[in-house]
Amino acid sequence: MVRPFHNLSLHFIVSVTYIDAIREAQEDLLREDDRVFLYGQDIANFGGAFKATKGLAEAYPNRVFDSPISEDAMIGLAVGAAIEGMRPIVEMQFADFSSIAFNQIVNQAATHFYRTGMPIPLTVRLPSGGTPGSGPFHSQSMEGLYAQYPGLVVVTPATVSDAYYMLIDAAKMNDPVIYCEHKFLYRWLKAKTIKGEHLPIGQARIARPGKHATVVTYSAMVHEAVRAADRLQQDGWEIEVVDLRSVKPLDIDTVLASVARTGRLLAVGEAFPWGGVTAEVVSRVTEEGFHLLDAPPQRLNSRDTPVPYHPKLWAAHRPTPESISEALRKLLSF
Amino acid sequence: MLKARILENKLSSLYKAGKIVGGVYLGKGQEAVSGCLGAALIQGKDCFAPLIRDQAGRTAFGEPLIDCTRTYLGSVEGPMKGRDGNIHRGRPDKGMPAMISHLGAQVPLIAGMLFAKRLKGVLEGCVGATCVGDGATSTGAFHEGLNMAAVEKLPMVVVIANNQFAYSTPNNRQFACGDLVERARGYGVGGYSVDGTDLMACASVIGEAVKQARLGKGPQMVVANLLRLSGHGEHDDGSYVPDSARAGYYGRDCIEVAIEQLVEGGYASQAKIDAWREEFSEEVQRAVAQAQQEALPDPYLEKWSALSTTFPYISS
Ligand SMILES: Cc1ncc(C[n+]2csc(CCOP(=O)(O)OP(=O)(O)O)c2C)c(N)n1
Ligand SMILES: [Mg+2]
């Protein structure tokens, strides 16, 4: 029997994806802490709309539950369970549907510790961001909205290891965490191992070092920004890309240190342009590091319309390597 | 309903050939329910908020096929101009709002359209209708909307297509009442049950509900029992639906039942039905071909504004 390159192919082909990391984190959490349970639509035997909980209901039959289509009540139930000492992880089928749970998230979960002294260890998973053809209601990026409210931690993993460790850390945290996982990265983003670098929530990361300008971004836009930086490299520009990792807390020190090196700032996000994470970054840098800036800080977001359905419109709605490169050239021309 | 089936079969093959981006959601097995509701309504007078499995109701209410193919294929000539796709389409000026994905949301919306007709003094004899699935009955919007319509005694008809599953979730994980129709009493609305695979039964029960609403008897809720004969979307094989359900009574195809009823009842001959099939297939082909020839949205020509208002002192 011929088994050509058997070991070789195993060595090169075996890779893990961003969604594998999310699944594995939940499995590890279920195994290690019996206060953890998963709640969401179609997450039990079906394994979730994106298969992020595949096989978990079989392994932990009394800890993974299908919920009715009742987002508001799903979070209400989770907060109640947290009060009783459980550590729920709730999957929204799409981030966009969390708008229905907005009341329970921002008023019940987020205010609880401040009002009563009892923290709420809740993790809400939001499958976020655009993919071609998804349209206005299956594409939203809601991190800025949740970050606006006191009492919530908001994380936006951009790597496979961050997807894993930040979900572990989110679930172990005693406060409510909005975990924004990017759908575009689910199967597209691969790594050799799930357990690579483990940085704490609240610390940003230099995704690509450079010296002429700083791009501050997060989630899927980290990869678009790195591509833009690669393009500008061909013209001799060295662009630094800072991956915020968590948008709240915001690691402004890492951002300021980068801007101190480059003197130029472009903040990029996939969310709508009014306010939000990029506006926060620019305002904090302007306030605390005005003297470091050699050019007016810039922002690039999606357009100020709902996320369009057609891929041709969608591609022009969100930041892309082209539009990020263009914004960088403008920034470098000052 | 036959036209809807032929159209949806075509959409499915276009999707499988990679010609449609995003999702394709079919009403296969639900045409009798949806079609009877659409047919009981009067376009130009009533309003109808269809949902994901309502191609038959849309067609019966008067939505041209081209609206469907243009929206699925992204034509700029379509009602949504490529800005929204697939079933997220409508013509609000023609009494057919464009659904949002958030389930249940159309229930209070229809209530609002009827409320406005009352304020304008034109409500007399009008009906507003919407369809939801069994899963959507678990949303706050459904409860709040139906309660509100009952309080206002609005002429609203809500048809619940209980196809036994919400995506993969079976009824027993969705609600605990024996039959959804029991809820009608709690809301203070009229309640009906019907076999959703039986065209004649649907026509009479849904027709009666619409009639009662039209007579000013307040909201009416119809629970139609059936089975979804496709996946949740065309990306899904629906393998979680047990064989026993497929082989059971509601696994039967409402189109086949309808044809039998029409032929046996002497309403139409088999030859007539075959001729319809041919005629509808051609109509579908034309609607697809036309949409395919039309321009796709152009980001450079797109008006990137989510507001109709322009502010004179603000340039961008
Ligand atoms: C508020 C809300 N939550 C989740 C979803 C995602 N979703 C889309 S369709 C669907 C299942 C709907 O089931 P049902 O209401 O029974 O309608 P059916 O698909 O069976 O016709 C779900 C969960 C949604 N569209 N809206
Ligand atoms: Mg259903």
Image: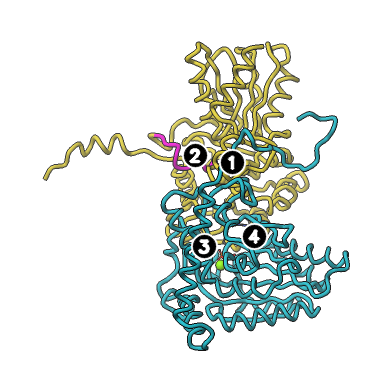
Chain colours: A yellow, B cyan
* Mark 1 residue type: Pro
Image coordinates for residue B44, horizontal then vertical, percent: 74, 66
Residue assigned mark 1: B297
The disc numbered 1 marks a residue on which chain? B
Residue B283 badge: 3
Which one is closest to the eye, mark 4 or mark 2? 4
- Could one spot residue B236 in this view of the protein? yes
Q: What secondary structure is found at the residue carrying circle 2?
A: helix
Question: Which badge, 4 or 1, comes first in the chain's sequence?
Answer: 4
Q: First in sequence: mark 4 or mark 3?
A: 4
Query: How many C-alpha atoms fall within 10 Å of the one at disc 1: few (<14), some, or many (≥20)?
Result: some
Residue situated in front as seen by the camera: A270 or B58:
B58
Whole-percent x and y of residue B134? 60, 69
Q: Secondary structure at mark 3?
A: helix
Which badge, 1 or 3, is on the more N-terminal residue?
Answer: 3
Q: Which residue is mark 4?
A: B103
- Disc 1 from disc 2: Cα separation: 26 Å
Disc 4 and disc 3: Cα gap in Å? 31 Å
**Does residue A10 appear left or right of residue B170 in this picture?**
left
Quadrant housing residue A307: top right
Image quarter hosting the N terminus of chain A: top left
Q: Magenta span has A182?
A: yes
Q: Are marks 2 and 3 in contact (CB under 8 Å)?
A: no
Q: Is mark 2 within 8 Å of ligand 1?
A: no
